[in-house]
Amino acid sequence: MGSIDLSVVIPFYNEADNLGHLHRELVSVLGGLNIQSEIVYVNDGSTDISMDELVKAIGKIRNLKVSIKVVTLRRNFGQTAAIAAGIKESSGDLVSFLDADLQNDPHDIPAFLKKIDEGYDAAFGWRKEKQFSSSRRFYSSAANKVINWIFSYPYHDVGCSARVVRKEYLRDLDLFGELHRILPVLVYLKGAKICEVVVKHRPRQAGKSKYGYGRIIKTAIDLITIKFLHSYGTKPAYVFGGFGFASLLLGGVTLLGVIYRKLFLGVYVHRDPLFLITVLLIILGVQFILMGLLAELMVRTYYGSSGKPIYDIKETIKY
């Protein structure tokens, strides 16, 4: 078939009722493009007849311009792990992502590719009309606002799975936890030129949603981790030292209060709760500073021993 221009990664878990229709629709769209493409299905440990339905659909619907690859994980590792496996197994210079629940419309892929042809490194979907419950729309909107504020991310919809990204910006991405939900932010932080495309968001017609509100907490923890690693990953002493000096400063202020209360109000130290607060703040301050120094040593040892630079070069031009 020659080189692959576009890989479409589709992770799925128990989507037996949707995979046949999705495959038929996707092959039709990709077959109409003037490029060579592949579909990378990632079976994330499905326990229903999803694989049977997918194999049946692949047997019935083929196109010479579209190759098929099916990756089966040993068990259910989660969507982030499935996406990471799909990226690794993909062969295209461009990688597209779709959910298997049919809520993403494959007919939006040409619009993404048009933006890539215009010079963008990544095109992400924007679900202007989300087909969710009102509570989930509220949480989605709130999450986008928080992410915009934390990372200065200037776009509307981080959580939309429909997207096309140049493969070079997906290499060396450390995907863990629930980080697939903020993949656009990770690509943005790598310096990619990105844009948004308004996409159609369809209501789920079959199968069961895998969304759970417990993932909100996991995503929040991932956000804190990514913010720390991005802003202070190579200089952890700054953040720990900042907390340490703030704690020592506050401890110094409370110590002055303890001295004043002892000298002028006759309050004995062993009866003064402010003294215990002072001791706690000073101990915490020292510990934070020591943690920062230890973290700094670990980071420098890591980069020094691995030979990994603390920067990422986009290109080098020689004249």
Image (cartoon, helix red, strand yellow):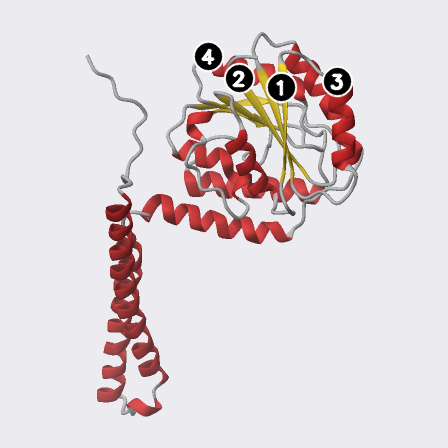
Q: Which class describes the residues within 10 Å of circle 4: few (<14), some (14-19), or many (20+)?
A: few
The reply to whether dot 4 and dot 1 touch (C-beta < 8 Å) is no
Q: Is residue 284 above or below residue 13?
A: below
> Could you tell me how far apart the alpha carbons at marks 2 and 3 are, in whole angstroms?
19 Å
Q: Which class describes the residues within 10 Å of circle 2: few (<14), some (14-19), or many (20+)?
A: some
> Could you tell me how far apart the alpha carbons at marks 4 and 1 are, in whole angstroms?
26 Å
Q: Which amino acid lies under the numbered mark 1 shown in the image of this protein?
A: Ser
Q: Which amino acid lies under the numbered mark 4 shown in the image of this protein?
A: Glu
The answer to which of marks 1 and 3 sits earlier in the sequence is 3
Front tag of 4 and 3: 3
Q: Is residue 140 left or right of residue 314?
A: right
- Residue 77 seen by the camera: yes
* Secondary structure beneath label 1: strand
Q: Which residue is mark 2?
A: 4
Q: Is residue 48 left or right of residue 1?
A: right
Q: Which residue is mark 1?
A: 67
Q: Which class describes the residues within 10 Å of circle 3: few (<14), some (14-19), or many (20+)?
A: few
* Secondary structure beneath label 4: loop
The reply to whether dot 1 and dot 2 touch (C-beta < 8 Å) is yes
